[in-house]
Image (tube, rainbow, N blue to C red):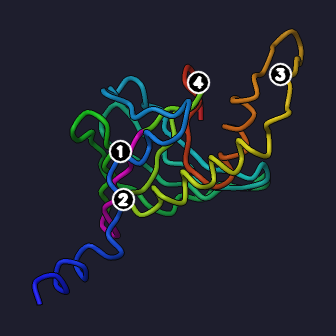
Amino acid sequence: MIVLLFSTLSYGQVPEKNIYKTTEGLTIVDSITCKDIIGGFYKSDGLGGYSFRLDSNMTFQKNDFSCMAKFAVDSGSWTIKNSNTVVLKSAKEILYFDVVKFDKFYFFVLPAQRKVFIEDLQTTIKQFKNTKPIAVNDEVYSKNYLIGCYLVKSYFAKEIDDITI
C-alpha cells in the first residue's frame, strides 16, 4: 500500500533542476541579478510573440506583439528567488521560471517545461550538428548561438548583453 502511494505521488512529478545537467553547453545560472534581466525576456517566431518587460521598480508588463501592433495583456511584480528563479506575480497568475544559460542566451523555463526543453534542445543540437559558424556584417555567429535563436520561438529568452527587448 505504501509503495502504491509513493509511486502515485512521484508519477508525473516535475523533474528536478538537475535535469539541466544532462546537456553539454547548458548550465543552471548560479546567481542571476536584477541587472542581468532588467529589460525583460521574450519568445518570438519572428513575426509575433510575447515579451515580459521587467523594470528596476520590480514591476513587469506582459505584451503580446506582432509586426503590426503590441498589446499589454498582464502586469504585476517580479522578484528573484534562490538566486536562479524569476518569479512573476500578477492578479491572474504566479509564474516561476528557472534561469539557464546556453551560449549567449538566458532561457527562462517553467518547471513543467523542464523535460520538454531538454528534449527540444537535444533534438535541435542534433539537427544543427553539421552547421558551421556564419558571418554577417563582420559578426560571427556560432552553431550554439544559432541553436539558441531557433529555441527562442518556443521558449522565453534574453540574449546576454542585450540591453533592449
**Image position of 122 with respect to 144: above or below:** below
Specify few, some or many for label 3: CA neighbours under 10 Å numbering under 14, 14-19, or 20 or more: few
Magenta stretch secondary structure, dominant: strand
Residue stretch in magenta: 91-99
Residue 146: say if magenta.
no
- Name the N-terminal-most of marks 2 and 3: 2
Specify few, some or many for label 4: CA neighbours under 10 Å numbering under 14, 14-19, or 20 or more: some
Instruction: Give the residue displayed 30% in from the left and 49% down from the top.
Output: 87
Provide the residue designation for mark 4: 162
On the image, the x and y values in percent for residue 101 come to: 49, 32
Three-letter code, disc 2: Pro
Instruction: Give the residue displayed 33% in from the left and 54% down from the top.
Output: 96
- Name the N-terminal-most of marks 3 and 1: 1
**Quadrant housing the C terminus:** top right
Mark 2 to mark 3 CA distance (whole Å): 33 Å
Mark 1 to mark 2 CA distance (whole Å): 8 Å
Instruction: Give the residue displayed 58% in from the left and 46% down from the top.
Output: 42
Provide the residue designation for mark 1: 18
Provide the residue designation for mark 3: 133
